[in-house]
Image (cartoon, grey):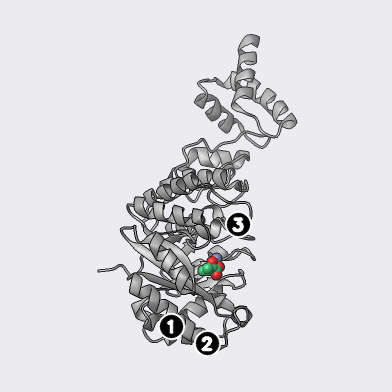
Amino acid sequence: MTDKNRVYIFDTTLRDGEQSPGATMSHAEKLEIASMLDEMKVDIIEAGFPIASEGDFAAVSEIAKNSKYSVICGLARAQLPDIDRCWEAVKHAARPRIHTFIGTSPLHRAIPNLDQDQMAERIEQTVTHARNLCDNVQWSPMDATRTEHDYLCRVVEIAIKCGATTINIPDTVGYTAPRESADLIRMLIEKVPGADEVIFATHCHNDLGMATANSLAAVEAGARQIECTINGLGERAGNTALEEVVMAMRVRNDIMPFSTEIDTTKIMNLSRRVAQVSGFPVQYNKAIVGKNAFLHESGIHQDGVLKNIETFEIMRPADIGLNENNIVLGKHSGRAALRSKLADLGFEVGDNQLKDVFVRFKALADRKKEVYDDDLVALMQDSSANT
Ligand code: KIV
Ligand code: ZN
């Protein structure tokens, strides 16, 4: 029996993420990231856009051959040669998927210069063709959130009738907001015949900083696949960040009772590796994976964390595979944090010595932004020499 609250995680770091200007990854780096995603138990990896280049084709084929857990998906425009090329690349996977898309909003329909009926015909032809090649077909009406609702219902119904098994609803330009995102998914599930036979996916961009909220709202309305990238990598302001939606559903499972299979302890390593290979550093205060996400400098916070980690932390660093000390010493730190840090460094100090070191530590912290382990060792050596 399938769990009605199971949410599938579709990672598109290697496709939409790599589309970020300057984020191009080498063949070997793509294989490495794909293997890390597979080990993290991402349900579907969108490995690339096979018709885009020989390099993309080779990467998708190789990833397809090597995947153990994940479904391997390739992207194709609504054109028969694209779909054939995509199939040639993904067919090596134990579980392949073809993802085909076309822009359905008035602005996007104008590009290939198709009227509503002509586009509907194109969708019928291409989805049928994809389904004849592969029994796992995802279809996306690009710019869905700016497509007229009656037309969106019409084309989603066609895609389902032609054999699409997942219907993805992209917010291509990051334009929607949480309530609207939920209403759109709910409307499609209620109105489109056959909607209960497919999985609805949400694919959000972060132009207004709402990608995570929009994705979670869509899930609350019935979507069961979230499309996302590691570190939120992606064009412009990026895509929904995988680590944010996964950890939000885990930490707030009381109000969002959805489950994934993701091994969250692999998140931090993946985040670091994606930052390295894409050349896109993670902002210090980025939720979940930022350098400061688990750091505490203020004395009150450090005291609380030392006594009981839950006082100021809603999740444990170890949950995302971070085993580092979460106390950073600075001018706001107190004696308890200093004593704990010194103990970590192998110095057990009595009350009198702590008093002395604390005064000199504060003077140093006033001059420096952050006091490092080496500074503390030097202070301790100085303090021992003076006693
Ligand atoms: O943002 C978007 O619309 C896309 C599609 C190709 C799914 O990435
Ligand atoms: Zn996208």
Q: Earlier in the sequence, mark 3 or mark 2?
A: 3
How far apart, in angstroms, are the residues tagged by discs 1 and 3? 31 Å
Helix or strand or loop: what does disc 1 sit on?
Answer: helix
Q: Position of residue 73 (x, y in %)?
A: 41, 62
Residue at 60% x, 47% y: name it: 282
Asked if marks 1 and 3 touch (Cβ < 8 Å), the reply is: no
Q: Is residue 93 visible?
A: yes
Residue at 57% x, 41% y: name it: 295
Q: Residue furthest right?
A: 367
Q: Earlier in the sequence, mark 1 or mark 2?
A: 2
Q: Is mark 2 within 8 Å of ligand 1?
A: no
Asked if marks 3 and 2 touch (Cβ < 8 Å), the reply is: no
How far apart, in angstroms, are the residues tagged by discs 1 and 2? 10 Å
How far apart, in angstroms, are the residues tagged by discs 3 and 2? 32 Å
Above-or-below relation of 375 to 307: above
The crowd level at tag 3 (other Cα within 10 Å; few <14, some 14-19, many 20+) is: some
Q: Quadrant of the N terminus?
A: bottom left
Q: Quadrant of the C terminus?
A: top right
The quadrant in which residue 19 appears is: bottom right
**In front: 183, or 368?**
183
Q: On the image, numbered disc 1 is attached to which residue?
A: 124
**In front: 224, or 16?**
16
Q: Nearer the viewer, mark 3 or mark 2?
A: 2
Q: Position of residue 260 (x, y in %)?
A: 38, 59
The crowd level at tag 1 (other Cα within 10 Å; few <14, some 14-19, many 20+) is: some
Q: On the image, numbered disc 2 is attached to which residue?
A: 118
Q: Nearer the viewer, mark 1 or mark 3?
A: 1
Q: Earlier in the sequence, mark 1 or mark 3?
A: 3
Q: On the image, numbered disc 3 is attached to which residue?
A: 20
